[in-house]
Amino acid sequence: MDTTDRPVALVAGASRGLGLLIATDLAARGHDVAICARDLEETQQGAELARQRARATTGPRAGRVLALRCDVSDRDAVAGMVEQAEQELGPIEVLLHVAGVIQVGPAEAMAFEHFDEAIGTMLTGAVNTVWSVLPGMRERDRGRIGVVTSIGGVVAPPHLLPYATAKFGAVGFTQGLAAELAGTGVSATCIVPGLMRTGSHENAMFTGDRAAEYAWFAPAASLPLLSMDARRAARKMVDGVLAGRPMVTLTPLAAVGSRVHGLMPATTIRVMGLTTRLLPGTPASGDTTTSVRGSAAADRLGSAASAVVDRLTVLGSRAAARLNQRDPGATLR
């Protein structure tokens, strides 16, 4: 394929995890892909992994992967990043906004800055990236936009309040955008996944009783019955966006949760309330609002608890090592 004929995609939040898988999938399909994240070195590492894996899949047909630094909550930075991507690769025809942060802990252990970061990354960040590419897409009468939201943006889960707040906004934004763009040649896809095995528990941030919060969240994000294989999820997301589907819902639990909440919202809220009572409480003293990364929270577990959690998170930890979620020299826990 002549490189001048390649479609160009932008994946925001693709230095690791799900975004890295999506970028790899697009490159393997022959797209030239720009990826961005806040840490340039980590993004460059992700770009190299995406290039290698795409070429291993499709050989010379694989597209280029360009690494750029950008904080999606910064509107001017996003505009500059999009301009640079288009100068180096060409007009962006496909956008997937994947950037996200996960903050786990009880509501009373969350501070204003947790909400600011979550909303800035997952809601304002989505608006910033979409609005930076949309004028060009509309001018060309074609384009594909996908925003990765969450079942947590449909049914508010316990101990993830900043996350749910931002994701609920992202769901409304993307669904409204899809309706506004009808008939223009540009489509918007609201992607609603459940838990996926991306190794995200190692980079999630924990407040409150940090070790106890990690002990429930990490297995939930790793066990096959509760979480989906991330490679399969990424492929289905890209399929849906390129097809211009308005909604893509992944995992049976996400589909069931959406339907039950739509029919019986008061019931699902009560169930979430009962679930909250089973989760760790906030320590009576000490600093409870300072966030600790998952890898550090795991180190606070006692030896017996650590052994159990390690066994329950084997698949998630393997995904973390594969998807640039940890230092290259780190070993599996």
Image (cartoon, rainbow, N blue to C red):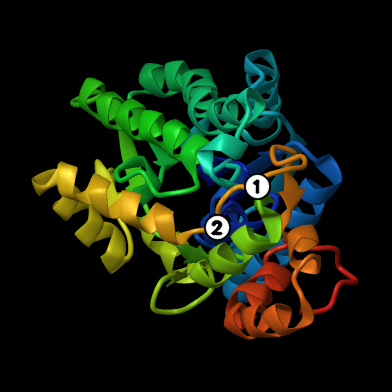
How many marks overall?
A: 2
Q: Amino acid at mark 1?
A: Gly
Q: Amino acid at mark 2?
A: Pro
**Residue 272 image offset from top left, x and y in percent:** 32, 51
**Residue 292 image offset from top left, x and y in percent:** 75, 49
Label number found at residue 56: none
Answer with left or right where residue 233 lies relative to residue 263: right
Q: Residue furthest left?
A: 263
Answer with left or right where residue 184 lies relative to residue 33: left
Residue 183's place in the image compared with 231, above or below, is above
Residue indicated by mark 2:
280
Q: Which of the marked residues, 1 or 2, is nearer the chain's N terminus? A: 1
Q: Quadrant where the N terminus lies?
A: bottom right
- Local secondary structure at mark 1: loop
Residue 306's place in the image compared with 207, above or below, is below
**Residue 74 image offset from top left, x and y in percent:** 67, 19
Residue indicated by mark 1:
208
Determine if residue 294 is in view. Answer: yes
Q: Residue furthest right?
A: 329
At label 2, counting other C-alpha atoms closer than 10 Å, the crowd grade (few under 14, some 14-19, many 20 or more) is some
> Based on the displayed image, in which of its 4 quarters is residue 10 positioned?
top right
Front residue (pair 313, 266): 266
Q: Quadrant where the C terminus lies?
A: bottom right
How far apart are the alpha carbons under marks 1 and 2? 8 Å
**Residue 291 image offset from top left, x and y in percent:** 73, 43
Task: Give the residue displayed 71% in from the left and 26% down from the top.
Answer: 84
Answer with left or right where residue 65 lies relative to residue 141: right
- Local secondary structure at mark 2: loop
Dot 1 and dot 2 residues touching (CB under 8 Å)? yes
Determine if residue 238 is in view. Answer: no
Task: Give the residue displayed 36% in from the left and 41% down from the top.
Answer: 153
